[in-house]
Amino acid sequence: MLKSGPMCQDVPAFQPDGLFSSPMEIHHSKGSEDPALHLEWDNGASLVGENGSYHLKVPEIDLDIQVHPEKPMMLHGDGGQTLDEDKKGTSMFYYSWPRTEATGVYKGGKVTGTAWVDHEYALGGDSNQDPLALSYGWNWFSLLTSGPNKMEICVTQVINEGEIFEQYVVYHDEAGVRHEVRDFSLTSSRTWVSGHTFQNFDTCWSLKIPSLNVDLEIESITQNQELQTWLRMPSFYEGAVRFSGTWEGGPMKGYGAMELTKGTDTSRSMEQILSNATSVVRKEVDVWVPSSIRANHFKHITKVHFDSYEQDVIQKNIVEAFYMLNNRGGKNWRPMLFGAAVGMVGGNANDWRSFLVLPELVHTASLIVDDIQDESESRRGGPCVHKVLGVPTAINAGCALYFWGETIIRDNKLLTDRQRRDIYAMYFEMMRVGHAGQGLDINGMTMDKLPTLQEAEEMLARVINLHRCKSGIPAAFCGTVGALVGGGTPKQIEAMGAYVQNLGIAFQIRDDVLDVLGKVSGKNAADDLYNHKITYPVAKLFALDHPDREKWYGYWEAHDVPALVEALQSSGTIDRCNEDIQRTVREGWDLVDAITPNSYSKALFSLFAEFLIVQHY
């Protein structure tokens, strides 16, 4: 569905990367007085210099910086060579000036600081075309000590499928002498998940070098330091760190830079993305629905003061009811599509992380209430909430959760008044439609006689409309609001909502198909058929002009579920349902594709659509 990518030729650029408007000019040195490196590109930008001293000018962002080395050049790996070619494909040559003085002007103001200058290149071959170049990731740190005794430390790990292929610590001591250590450990203690790309990055590490009696803690100065680029799909985690601890038994502290990237496993990319989405959603959920009582939280939610006894009751009867079901898992594809919708129109979902909670609150609430209305016994592999807490408490908890998420909209400081009003309107429209759909679902559809083909088509249309009300429009809320807060145009917002509605309908059709096949987690095989429920495959079966229609109706009338399952498969109905899923998923994509720039967020939509078509949950 997404025809272009970072390695494709003659295709539009992917955001946030942009192509130069004209070829870069490379000026070759003509004599000893000319610098070894002289590059010029768009709008007067240039990079000139050699041997660690460089002058960078980018007029477009009002940047004019010069760097000069304060300490000697550092060779990495084995005398500068890294990534043994026999093991990992393309070998690299890598050297740095780890501590350089930086001075200049940025946006009209004078700036000074310390910079790290890197140069790394492939030793033969094109690393961009090497499949192994995408299979491995790395953890890289540049650490500069503070104080009079200055040291420069580089920590590098190259990782493939969880295995460390290469690691080294290279450091310059106070006298500038190079040392190298291979035996060390680097372990993570905290993580951060991007709400934009749903990549999972470590943010705090413990570095131990036994031979040197080194024990350092390294931490990101701020969590959101993701750098999205198609040079390394989808992003680097790159930015500032601080560190402290002991080196050779003595105290040490300082600052530095880090760069982390993940290896790309395309065989299970969507599963990993959904898993990461679950992680970030759960962290955000705990902010808005604290799993343990937090001072003044209920007062903030309701504007009413509650004593400790009352808070305990509310926590038990509402919050614990929510977590009873939410902790059993879920697919979290709705929050993932919200984040992708923000990115597709040029926004960044990390600015709107709280909104990832909204669809999960509504969805969990609807499941609690639906289970009561359907007289269900179990959900997600455990007893329904009303079976544990009782029907009155479960009804109240579900209803309360419908309104809990309103505080996310109310409290958000980035929304304009117009956006807030629009989101309120969409939220309550979604709730009205969802309850209308639930009313249809409770009433159900009956098939007291063999339907005519026209009656079967009408029945199929009603199933689709039911899925639109209960799944499509709640999903569309995520796409529409995502495009709205991401800064989309009215045309983009409308197209995004319509397309995500199709994904929601297709998802529910897929759920109906998987029920027949016995592949819905937490449910018995053909559970809906045993409950005599007219689902999409059943309506599709009787809409076929087929000589066995009367025989099939006999199976339905006799509640002969095994025979009905066999008929659904042998008649080609399941295959036709899968074709309808493909058609529904692709319907509306061409318009969305045409009016949004290429981006990783667009790739997420495309990946999820294909995942919906071919994968089973």
Image (cartoon, helix red, strand yellow):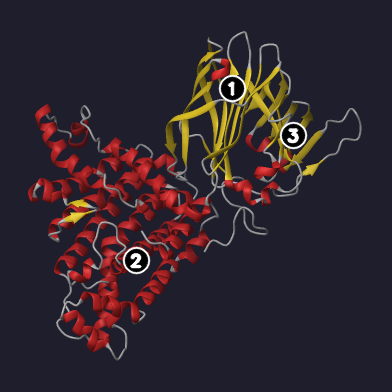
Q: Which is more toward the observer, 584 or 487?
A: 584
- Residue 122 in percent (x, y) is at 73, 41
Task: Give the CA distance from mark 2 to mark 3.
Answer: 54 Å
For the point 52% across and 25% down, which residue is it? Answer: 241
Outermost right residue: 31
Residue under label 2: 510
- Residue 229 in percent (x, y) is at 58, 44
User: Regarding mark 2 in the picture, which secondary structure is present there?
Assistant: helix
Q: Is residue 603 left or right of residue 376?
A: right
User: Regarding mark 3 in the picture, which secondary structure is present there?
Assistant: strand
Residue under label 3: 47
For the point 23% across and 53% down, which residue is it? Answer: 381
Q: Are the residues at dot 3 and dot 1 in contact (C-beta closer than 8 Å)? A: no
Q: Is residue 613 left or right of residue 19?
A: left
Residue under label 1: 143
- Is residue 429 at least partly visible in the picture? yes
The amino acid pointed to by label 2 is Arg
- Residue 314 in percent (x, y) is at 13, 37
Assess disc 1: are there few (<14), some (14-19) or many (≥20) residues with their C-alpha within 10 Å of its C-alpha.
Answer: many
Task: Give the CA distance from mark 3 to mark 1.
Answer: 25 Å
351, above or below 391, in the image:
above
For the point 51% across and 28% down, which residue is it? Answer: 186
- Is residue 111 at least partly visible in the picture? no
